[in-house]
Amino acid sequence: MESYIQLSKSPGPIGVFDSGYGGLTIYNEIQKLLPQYDYIYLGDNARTPYGTRSFDVVYEFTRQAVRYLFQQGCQLVILACNTASAKALRTIQQVDIPSLDPNRRVLGIIRPTVECIGDITENRHVGVLATEGTIKSHSYPLEIRKLYPEIEVTGEACPMWVPLVETGEYNSEGADYFVKRHVDNLMARDPEIDAIILGCTHYPLLLDKIRKYTPERVKLLTQGSAVAESLKLYLERHTSMEELCTKGGNTLFCTTEAGGKFGEQASVFLNHSIEVKNVTLV
Ligand code: DGL
């Protein structure tokens, strides 16, 4: 992330980034819990999905998104995308931020999700449903092991689920087929699983179908409220960052796709219509 971009130290909105619409499930919960702040939501809908892309490509796209949000004045950016959190967060935190502006922060959503799981599983057998990129990165087992070494983690990649959400097909019969297939695969690999992390921000849109095909005794963990609670705590503990977050209660929605299309789809997630700005990431 080149250091020639002009960054200001003045307060700005909180940036929320996802490869597409999925991060709106996180934004919704954050905005509900912390309505006083301003936000910029950025969806890279023109290049979604990220889940099947290589490490280098996800890192480069995420770096461009963070750079854009920094240029818009965000001092704090949340990667509301597990794939980006798994593949790009650490490099951005360790390599890019120090050379760009060591006072800015980029936070991911895997750690706050993992922190909750210890209270949810009783028999210490946990499943993770996520994109291929997130599963292959092993981020969930690695993070879970740090906090709860006794928990056994089994992951299942669900490459069709994000396209089902992005194309608005998440209520279709075709979605039933793909949801059942991956839930069955996961449960067959470890029938003792008693809690499943929905480790992709798109998956809450498939929650009814996931519930339908998952044994009733198995608890399902979505990420929105865990991430929102963790952000609240972060801002309480980091008052100098909190002071750099503007408080007007406004949100600007940006997408790399056509704004009209994003607005239509996003209203399904948000239950209200929005103004959308089209942006180009470089
Ligand atoms: N929603 C994102 C996640 O949480 C990524 C989806 C994708 O672009 O593949 O992983």
Image (cartoon, helix red, strand yellow):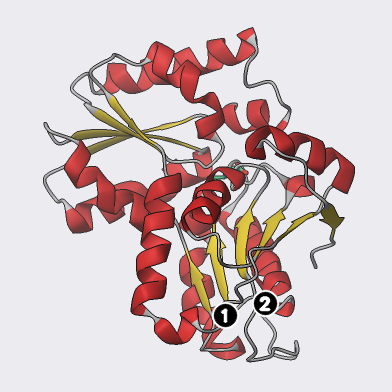
Label 1 amino acid? Asp
The disc, 2 or 1, on the residue closer to the chain's N-terminal end is 2
- How far apart are labels 2 and 1 at the CA level? 12 Å
Q: Residue furthest top?
A: 173
What residue is drawn where x is 60% and y is 60%?
16
Residue 25 visible to an observer of this rendering: yes
Name the residue nearer the viewer: 126 or 245. 245
Question: The residue tagged with tag 1: helix, strand or loop?
Answer: helix
Q: Residues within 10 Å of mark 1 (few under 14, many from 20)?
A: some
What residue is drawn where x is 65% and y is 78%?
12
Q: Name the side, left or right, on which 164 lies relative to 218.
A: right
Q: Which residue is mark 1?
A: 96
The spot of residue 120 in percent (x, y) is 21, 38
What residue is drawn where x is 48% and y is 82%?
241
The spot of residue 111 in percent (x, y) is 35, 57
Q: Nearer the viewer, mark 2 or mark 1?
A: 2
Q: Is residue 192 above or below residue 147?
A: above
Q: Quadrant of the N terminus?
A: bottom right
Q: Which mark is residue 47?
A: none
- Rendered-image quarter of ligand 1: top right
The spot of residue 132 in percent (x, y) is 51, 38
The image quarter containing residue 176 is: top right
Q: Which mark is residue 70?
A: 2
Question: The residue tagged with tag 2: helix, strand or loop?
Answer: helix
Q: Name the side, left or right, on which 255 lies relative to 12.
A: right
The image quarter containing residue 273 is: top right
| Ligand 1 closer than 8 Å to label 1 CB | no
Label 2 amino acid? Phe
